Amino acid sequence: MVACAALLSLACGYGTSTRTAKDIKSVYVPFFENRTAEPNLEITFTDGIIQSLVNDNTLKVVPEAGADATLDGEIVSFKDQPFSFNESLDADEYHLVITVSCTLFNRRTNEPIWQHQQFVGTGSYFLEGNSGRTRADAMDQAIQEIRDRILNLTVQDW
């Protein structure tokens, strides 16, 4: 429900740029489906996509009824695996990999603008030491990579 409130509060972002298809001025972003065991990933990810679109200011983020397009997707995998080991063969560094599949659908023509695009984001963190990189930092990095790629594909000339 947090993302719904965020969607409504962010729906005032206006887009006036000409980087998108001429008939697409607004987009609806439903919750991404989370097919992983990582809790609340869909909320963090969907809120981030909405915020990225609002900050970009090319498309207006609106409720479904008023949208020219729908950005729909699912988080298909989340891997958090050891990457490097110490002398005792204990994992020191972990590598996070998140994979998302998305479709941007033109609601006016009832056709996809692009569909089933796979986006992968990565991040790494250390369990101990002075690296300062936490699991949360690694997750933020992976999600940001994916959001940037989706945003670039969404607002480029189609």
Image (cartoon, helix red, strand yellow):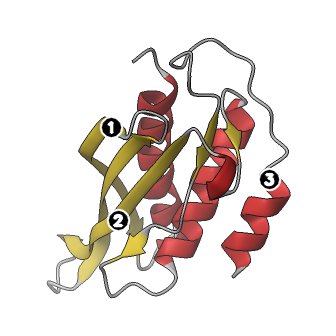
The three-letter amino acid code for the residue at tag 1 is: Glu
Residue 99 visible in the picture: yes
- Mark 3 or mark 1, which is nearer to you? 1
Q: Amino acid at mark 3?
A: Leu
Q: Which residue is mark 1?
A: 111
Q: How many marks?
A: 3
For label 3, the crowd category at 10 Å Cα-Cα, with few meaning under 14, some 14 to 19 and many 20 or more, is some
Q: Is residue 73 above or below residue 37?
A: above
In front here: 96 or 91? 96
Residue 29 falls left or right of residue 61? left
Q: Is residue 24 left or right of residue 114?
A: right
Q: Is residue 44 depicted above or below 122 in this figure?
A: below
Determine whether, in the image, residue 146 is placed left or right of residue 84. Answer: right
Q: Can residue 131 be seen at all in this image of the molecule?
A: no
User: Which circle, 1 or 2, is nearer the viewer?
Assistant: 1
The residue that appears at 34% across and 55% down in the rendered structure is 122
List x then y, in percent, for residue 18: 62, 11
- Furthest toward the front, the residue is 109
Percent x, y of residue 14: 80, 32
The residue type indicated by label 2 comes to Glu
Q: Which of the pair 15/95 is nearer the observer?
A: 15
Pointer 3 and pointer 1: residues touching (CB < 8 Å)? no
Which comes before the other along the chain, label 3 or label 1?
3
Residue 24, quarter of picture: top right
| Callout 2: SS | strand
The circle drawn on residue 10 is: 3
Q: Residue at x 17, y 79 (%)?
A: 87
The quadrant of the image that shows the N terminus is: bottom right
Q: Position of residue 31 (x, y in %)?
A: 52, 69
Q: Which residue matches tag 2?
A: 74
State the CA–CA distance, disc 3 to disc 1: 26 Å
Q: Provide residue 97's location: percent of width, then percent of height.
A: 28, 62
